Image (cartoon, helix red, strand yellow):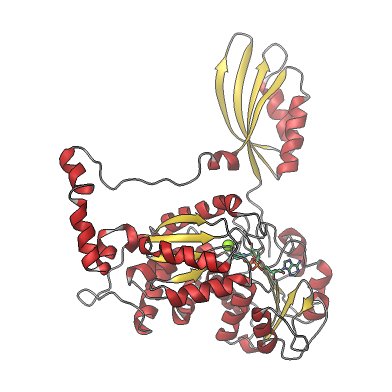
């Protein structure tokens, strides 16, 4: 396989040139000679003696960007006025906002959308709470709830620092499935308090997407909320990840032509995502999975006070292997990383069975860099947007909630998740399937539609859909 890295750091450099000393050609030459790629140039202002230009320059990474800026600083007649990072610019003032669906143009509009007439609408909902689905934002709105304790692979960075990720998820909900989602980042790590707050918020929302809540607390929070609420509650890091992983896994083992029941899988990071991916793989027919966390292999020879690990020890590692990742990975067919950077080495890869498949899914830095792994693996996937084979829950959560909201599902159950996984996998046809294309692109417009359709059908078949079919056809908003 071949790995292509596409993102890097994009810098906007504001440069002031003294015309008698420095030329634009010298600038461009210096940037080019230092490996930078000039993407755009704007002339901001000019006098007889100076010119101020904004140059957008692509660098490999931050350090490379800093090196280019240093070289420009050293050029006679060039002043570096400002350096902006395009990523930070895209976050200025946040990434989402609320729009009204109709303007309030006059007193008549005012008295209908607001007092006095709004009171009649409130009373209608008071008389029949189900009307909240037709008369409020509930039918299309999801709360993205986090406590900021397991944000990507950054760990416990707190509620405020988690907001950019949750805003990003809200953008993706809207863009890919027209679901209105809102970040609810809670400044508490208390399980009971989180459950109480989410329960109290639920009247506004048609679904709850739990995000980046650390394990093992995430399991109890999700289980309790699922029991206590009558709207779907879905922990994205568990189930969204597991759905997409299964889709990529099914396609990857087709490429290496290994039967699912014979495949040996190693999972590192037995947290929210690791446990859920393991359960999904077992449900799909995988028989031999070994889990490894910070203290080594999880085996039934040990006792754990973590209930999730207790389950893991009883349901995986049939041969009772003990030790470290190096002991687990010998002759493994598939590695699944849901832990942190640098966990997997080339020595580990060399110990794997023929045609290794590696899903290094820790974000933002995978368990092994694809460029390093490339010579030793047959199929390589990461969770990142800037490499091929992106195994990321963004392929799942927009479509799964679209489907659940459309059929007003009481929950998102196992058949709905399996249907979503199979729908994602099936988008890659047998003719298209290859080492660099095991999973459709996030931008493939068929993904969310296929997922939501499959989810609605599975919800109806499993008896959790609460919305009538119209004229024999299920109407979705996609
Ligand atoms: N690609 C994707 O769609 C997704 C990727 N992830 C990534 O997976 C990772 C874990 O996420 P969660 O399960 O939500 O977090 P979590 O906090 O619930 O679990 C992480 C687990 O990994 C273990 N771990 C951390 N470093 C380790 C190491 N060096 N060796 C072995 N075990 C280690 C921790 O002890 C913990 O049990 C994060 O990097 C996250 O970004 C999570 C969800 C989706
Ligand atoms: C993708 C995602 O949800 C995570 O890395 O936590
Ligand atoms: Mg997450």
Asked whether residue 298 is in view, the answer is yes
Residue 447, percent from left and from top: 45, 65
Q: Residue at x 70, y 38 (%)?
A: 36
Quadrant of the picture in which ligand 1 is shown: bottom right
- Quadrant into which the N terminus falls: bottom right
Q: Quadrant of the C terminus?
A: bottom left
Badge count: 0
Residue closer to the observer: 390 or 469? 469
Residue 255 in picture, x, y percent from top left = 62, 76
- Residue 48 image-quadrant placement: top right
Q: Is residue 382 left or right of residue 203?
A: right
Task: Choose between 5 and 292: the one closer to the eye.
Answer: 292
Please, which residue is most extreme toward the top here? 48
Height in image: 236 above or below 79?
Answer: below
Q: Is residue 420 visible?
A: no
Res. 321 image quadrant: bottom right
| Residue 361 position within the rendered picture, expressed as x and y whole percent measured from the top left | 65, 65
Residue that extends furthest to the left in the rendered view of this protein: 108
Residue at 48% x, 66% y: name it: 196
| Res 65 quadrant in image | top right
- Taking the view exactly as shown, the residue that stands out farthest to the bottom is 319
User: Residue 93, position in %: x, y?
Assistant: 51, 39
């Amino acid at each position: 396989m071949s790995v292509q890295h596409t993102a890097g750091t994009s810098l906007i450099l504001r440069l002031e040139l003294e015309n008698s000393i420095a030329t634009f050609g010298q600038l461009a030459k210096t940037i080019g000679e230092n490996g930078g790629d000039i993407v755009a140039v704007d002339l901001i202002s000019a006098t007889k003696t100076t010119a101020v230009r904004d140059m957008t320059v692509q660098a490999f990474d931050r350090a490379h960007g800093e090196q280019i800026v240093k070289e420009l600083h050293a050029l006679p007649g060039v002043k570096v006025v400002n350096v902006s990072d395009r990523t930070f610019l895209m976050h200025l003032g946040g990434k989402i906002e609320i729009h009204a669906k109709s303007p309030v143009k006059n007193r008549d509009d005012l008295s209908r959308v607001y007092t006095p007439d709004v009171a009649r609408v409130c009373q209608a909902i008071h008389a029949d709470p189900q009307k909240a689905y037709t008369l409020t934002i509930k039918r299309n709105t999801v709360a993205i709830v986090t406590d900021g304790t397991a944000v990507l692979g950054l760990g416990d960075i707190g509620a405020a620092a988690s907001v950019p990720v949750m805003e990003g998820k809200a953008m993706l909900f809207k863009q890919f499935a027209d679901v209105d989602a809102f970040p609810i980042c809670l400044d508490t790590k208390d399980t009971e308090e989180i459950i109480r707050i989410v329960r109290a918020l639920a009247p506004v929302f048609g679904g709850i997407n739990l995000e980046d809540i650390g394990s093992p607390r995430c399991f109890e929070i999700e289980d309790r909320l699922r029991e206590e609420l009558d709207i779907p509650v879905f922990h994205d890091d568990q189930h969204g990840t597991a759905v997409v992983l299964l889709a990529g896994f099914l396609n990857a083992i087709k490429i290496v032509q290994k039967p699912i029941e014979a495949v040996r899988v190693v999972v590192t990071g037995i947290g929210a995502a690791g446990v859920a991916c393991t359960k999904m793989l077992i449900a799909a027919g995988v028989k031999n999975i070994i889990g490894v966390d910070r203290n080594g292999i999880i085996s039934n020879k040990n006792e754990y006070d973590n209930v999730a690990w207790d389950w893991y020890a009883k349901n995986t590692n049939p041969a009772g292997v003990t030790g470290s990742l190096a002991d687990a990975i010998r002759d493994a067919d598939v590695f699944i990383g849901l832990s942190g950077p640098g966990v997997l080495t080339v020595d580990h890869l060399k110990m794997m069975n023929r045609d290794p498949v590696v899903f290094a899914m820790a974000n933002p830095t995978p368990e092994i860099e694809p460029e390093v792994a490339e010579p030793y693996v047959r199929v390589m996937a990461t969770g990142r947007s800037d490499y091929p084979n992106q195994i990321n829950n963004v392929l799942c959560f927009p479509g799964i909630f679209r489907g659940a909201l459309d059929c007003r599902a009481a929950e998102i159950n196992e058949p709905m998740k399996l249907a979503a996984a199979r729908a994602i996998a099936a988008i890659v046809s047998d003719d298209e399937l290859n080492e660099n294309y095991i999973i459709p692109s996030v931008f493939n417009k068929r993904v969310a539609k296929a997922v939501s359709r499959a989810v609605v059908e599975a919800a109806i078949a499993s008896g959790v859909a609460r919305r009538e079919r119209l004229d024999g056809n299920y109407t979705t908003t996609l």
